[in-house]
Image (spheres, grey):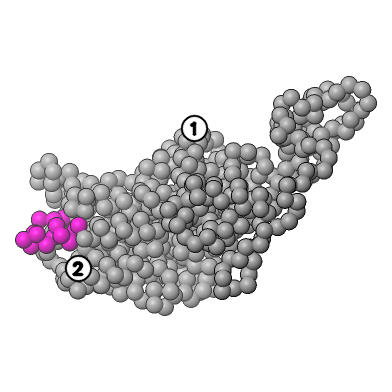
């Protein structure tokens, strides 16, 4: 390859003397296939007209193609024909050179499960990689550090090719959600590309590409790069904040397939909190996408804080989200404020019991009863008429169910702050059965799990005493907890650990504040 730094045509400032030469298009104009125009009557100009107008750096540092016809390979232009399956007549066509070069690379980097599979399947995956060259938009050539598969994942994002339905309330929200990734990728590709590649490595929908990406640790490498970039980024405007929020969602989506995403959520929400405390109108200026990503991160953090009796980063003021219909939380966003208050109350109960401050008990009990009364009386703030006119019947059903089980799970937690497990079980057990029955009903009617169902499912299953019911709940969690296999495994492990602790000689001293220590 020609060294661009030493080539006489590498940049507009290196133009040889002698006969006039046509200027080489700059990298930015070349990437978007736009004519690169330079002033004809000015000398010493450093930027083309487009870069000057946009205030961008104008360079021509891409490698220069060799002049002349490309040399033919030793085998000529013959193609190798390989059958993908002995029982079918479909053919996989690849140049012999690509077969020789690609096969060792896949064998060296792919996981054992990929390497040990049949040769036709390996060739099929190599064919996927071979096809990537002609699918990558030219503007992505500005990132030479990305390999072809990583560029392909960005292309999948640009063409709305990721699978997101299981994270959303329903298909009415799909296109807007996918478009939000496209918008940020087109406007801020250098900043979001790493997080989006990591996210797409799990959501591409192509199992073969996912496995090859896993073997090459693409997701881990890009997620690490995204987090490193996140730490040095600063927020100067609402646009910067919106970009940080979608970065957080993309990184968290990847992370929740392997481990907890709580550190990422807390970091980004901390940035939001510092701005929100100075200006409560900030949320109104975020727009629908920014608000959705904020609620996604906030809801994820609140679920963890409820179990650990810790305080979430942000408390959204009452009434600010009353008319919001969100792609993740539906019409349940107003409940997040009450869940914050429960986290605060649980933390105070925990401190009171650890420090033995019995005098605080009366004050906390009064707060608990007041919060319980408020939750019992609250109802959806978005009218049913509006929901019916704008969303499908299944989406309305999911939103109403989501609101109901978040409300019931909050009431169960409030009950267990005062009454330990194995005491006064009738009311919370009835609410638990209602939650589990609603989750089953939605699954049967719509074939989909409900977003943000992990915490209500966990809270409800903690109440179960019958071993048959417990076994049934574990089995159904395979479908109900569907964000990732990691989330499902963690949920099941938490249930087994808590049930084991509760069953020890019929313990009656486990309050909600003890749950975190029981599940480890």
Give yes or no for residue 499 being in the magenta stretch: yes
Q: Please indicate whether residue 460 sits to the left or right of residue 118 in the image.
A: left
Disc 2 is placed on an element classified as: loop
**Residue lying at the far front of the rendered structure:** 74
Spatial CA distance of label 2 from label 1 is: 47 Å
Disc 1 is placed on an element classified as: loop
Nearer to me, 331 or 11: 11
User: For residue 232, which numbered disc appears in the image?
Assistant: 1
Tell me where the magenta segment starts and ends, as one range: 497-511
Q: Please indicate whether residue 500 sits to the left or right of residue 110 in the image.
A: left
Whether residue 78 is visible: yes
Q: Residue at x 59, y 73 (%)?
A: 88
Q: Residue at x 80, y 26 (%)?
A: 8
Q: Quadrant of residue 34?
A: top right
Given contact means CB atoms under 8 Å apart, are the residues at marks 2 and 1 in contact?
no
Whether residue 291 is visible: no
Q: Residue at x 89, y 21 (%)?
A: 17
Nearer to me, 93 or 28: 93
Q: Residue at x 30, y 56 (%)?
A: 490
Query: How many residues crowd around disc 1 within 10 Å: few (fewer than 14), some, or many (20 or more)?
Result: few
Task: Quarter of the image for the N terminus: give it.
Answer: top right
Query: How many residues crowd around disc 2 within 10 Å: few (fewer than 14), some, or many (20 or more)?
Result: some
Total of numbered circles in the picture? 2
User: For residue 464, which numbered disc appears in the image?
Assistant: 2
Nearer to me, 74 or 25: 74
Residue 444 coordinates in the image, percent (x, y): 39, 77
Magenta region, main secondary structure: helix
């Amino acid at each position: 390859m020609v060294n661009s730094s030493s080539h006489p045509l590498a940049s507009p400032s290196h133009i040889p003397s002698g006969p006039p030469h046509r200027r080489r298009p700059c990298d930015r104009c070349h990437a978007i296939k736009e004519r690169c125009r330079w002033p004809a009557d000015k000398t010493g100009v450093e930027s083309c007209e487009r870069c000057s107008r946009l205030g961008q750096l104008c360079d021509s540092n891409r490698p220069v193609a060799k002049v002349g016809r490309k040399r033919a390979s030793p085998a000529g232009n013959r193609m190798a024909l390989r059958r993908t399956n002995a029982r079918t007549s479909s053919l996989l066509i690849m140049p012999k050179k690509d077969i020789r070069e690609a096969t060792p690379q896949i064998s060296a980097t792919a996981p054992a499960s990929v390497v040990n599979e049949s040769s036709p399947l390996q060739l099929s995956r190599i064919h996927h990689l071979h096809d990537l060259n002609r699918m990558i938009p030219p503007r992505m050539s500005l990132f030479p550090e990305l390999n072809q598969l990583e560029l392909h994942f960005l292309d999948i994002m640009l063409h709305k090719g990721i699978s997101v339905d299981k994270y959303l309330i329903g298909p009415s929200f799909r296109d807007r959600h996918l478009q939000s990734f496209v918008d940020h990728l087109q406007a801020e590709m250098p900043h979001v590309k790493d997080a989006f590649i990591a996210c797409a490595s799990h959501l591409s929908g192509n199992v073969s590409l996912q496995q090859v990406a896993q073997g090459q640790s693409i997701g881990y490498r890009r997620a690490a790069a995204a987090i490193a970039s996140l730490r040095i980024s600063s927020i100067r405007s609402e646009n910067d904040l919106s970009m940080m929020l979608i970065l957080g969602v993309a990184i968290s989506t990847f992370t929740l397939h392997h481990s907890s995403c709580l550190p990422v959520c807390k970091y980004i929400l901390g940035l939001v909190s510092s701005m929100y405390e100075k200006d409560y109108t900030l949320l109104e200026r975020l727009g629908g996408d920014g608000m959705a990503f904020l609620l996604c991160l906030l809801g994820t953090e609140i679920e963890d804080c409820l179990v650990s009796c810790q305080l979430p980063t942000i408390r959204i003021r009452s009434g600010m989200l009353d008319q919001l219909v969100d792609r993740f939380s539906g019409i349940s966003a107003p409940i997040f404020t009450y869940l914050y208050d429960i986290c605060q109350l649980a933390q105070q109960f925990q401190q009171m019991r650890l420090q033995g401050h019995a005098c605080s008990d009366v004050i906390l009990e009064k707060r608990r009863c007041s919060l319980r009364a408020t939750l019992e009386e609250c109802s959806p703030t978005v009218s049913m008429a509006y929901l019916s006119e704008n969303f499908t019947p299944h989406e309305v059903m999911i939103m109403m169910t989501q609101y109901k089980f978040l409300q019931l799970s909050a009431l169960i937690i409030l009950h267990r702050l005062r009454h330990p497990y194995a005491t006064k079980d009738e009311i919370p057990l009835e609410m638990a059965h209602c939650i589990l029955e609603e989750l089953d009903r939605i699954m049967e009617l719509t074939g989909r799990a409900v977003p943000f169902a992990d915490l209500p499912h966990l809270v409800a299953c903690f109440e179960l005493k019958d071993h048959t019911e417990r076994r049934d709940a574990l089995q159904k969690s395979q479908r109900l907890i569907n964000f990732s296999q990691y989330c499902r495994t963690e949920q099941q492990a938490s249930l087994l650990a808590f049930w084991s602790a509760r069953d020890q000689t019929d313990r009656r001293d486990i309050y909600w504040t003890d749950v975190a220590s029981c599940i480890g």
